Image (cartoon, helix red, strand yellow):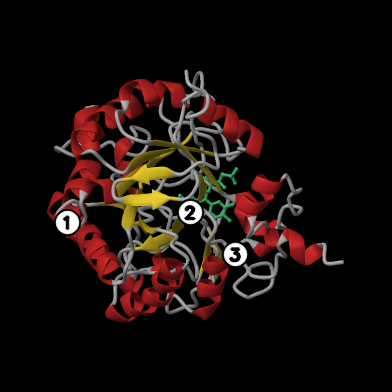
Amino acid sequence: MDTTTSPTLLSSFKLGDLTLKNRVIMAPLTRARAGVERMPNALMTQYYTQRASAGLIITEATVISQQGCGWVQSPGIYSEEQTEAWKQITKALHQTETPVFLQLWHCGRASHSSFQENNQLPVSASAIKLNGEYIHTPIGKQAYETPRALEIEEIPRIIEDYRLGAERAKKAGFDGIEIHGANGYLIDQFLQSKTNQRTDKYGGRIENRYRFLQEIVEAILTVFSPEKVAVRLSPNGNFNDMGSPEYRELFIYVAQQLNRYGLGYLHIVDGLEFGFHQLGEPMTLREFREVFDGPLMGNCGYSQDSAEATIKADNADLIAFGRPYISNPDLVERFANNWPLNPPAEMKDWYSFGAEGYIDFPTYPETHKS
Ligand SMILES: Cc1cc2nc3c(=O)[nH]c(=O)nc-3n(C[C@H](O)[C@H](O)[C@H](O)COP(=O)(O)O)c2cc1C
């Protein structure tokens, strides 16, 4: 291999007609600063702009409908007001030439009736309760409820909500969409046998369980060109009570099917730091590389060195950083200059609503002023 041209973490990357200035990607991070109206705002604009040296910013998960809500004060993209409000963020990032993808979200069973219109039960592929301690809701910590299985007639409405979300995202100036198919939310609930026991064309065989994601991808492709659309999957995770015995066959199948669209990238949460289902050997980026033809993004537990090694080994094109981006707005500059990272943020600040623990992490030069 000609090492003078081999890519590095800090080398640029061509994503369709977008040029990412480096391969350090800001992972989607729910931070719960959008208020009860789920409205993007000036504080969020400041937070994202501080992180604009990333090659690509993926926004925090953003709900496509009230039914999709399951997190207190996370932003939405289901109203004209929210669409307008997102423009301040896309505009600020485009002034820094940083592309930004919106992550579209429907929580499915990882919700509670107190989030829902008329206090209805949350919905899922099947009526299988999330086995978890509690969920934070607008009325405080609550026990999980058994969701209602979606009627087959209701599914087109949800696909349409995804399409509308993409259409609004386009109007708001986003460069593309990341479909949140990871971490036990609605799409993952359809994909995995643990949460999908349907007997109609959306359940049973892997091909059927994939259908919901397929229809979402195809709906979004009527709005954005393929290289502006991406999918995130978490084949190893147990977050939100997930993990199904056929995980390897399932996720290889999904990656192979997605080949037909020429998507911008496939985002795999391959690391185990966020929980591992322990149903067998973890899936690796190499396995996805072998079956997926397009750009591949890895995530979870990466350091600069492990990310660099992963790119050098050609196991991924891009690496997303989550927690490092919470406490290091200048992560790219720190990597480029071999500056140490700030200590990790305290977990109490992850979803704590205000400016504190959000936009107050200093850059390296700010802490080392002479
Ligand atoms: C505070 C916090 C919020 C998160 N929110 C999201 C989210 O909105 N969407 C998503 O796909 N993953 C979310 N994740 C998972 C991260 O994107 C990422 O997978 C995880 O932090 C592991 O990567 P890291 O080791 O680089 O932090 C979140 C993680 C954290 C810590």
User: Residue visible at 29% across and 41% down?
Assistant: 190
The reply, left or right, for residue 192 in relation to residue 44 is: left
Could you say where residue 293 lies in the image, as x and y percent from the top left?
A: 29, 28
Q: What residue type is labelled 3?
A: Tyr
Q: In this view, does 40 lie above or below 321?
A: below
Could you say where residue 14 lies in the image, as x and y percent from the top left?
A: 36, 44
Query: Mark 2 or mark 1: which comes first in sequence?
Result: 2
Residue 106 figure quarter: bottom left
Disc 1: which residue? 154
Is residue 204 visible to us here?
no
Mark sitting on residue 351: 3
Q: In the image, is the residue at mark 3 within 8 Å of ligand 1 by its beta carbon?
A: yes
The reply, left or right, for residue 254 in relation to residue 356 is: left
How far apart are labels 2 and 1 at the CA level? Answer: 28 Å
How far apart are labels 3 and 1 at the CA level? Answer: 32 Å
Disc 2: which residue? 28
Could you say where residue 312 lies in the image, as x and y percent from the top left?
A: 53, 27
How far apart are labels 3 and 2 at the CA level? Answer: 13 Å
Determine whether label 2 and label 1 are within 8 Å by CB: no
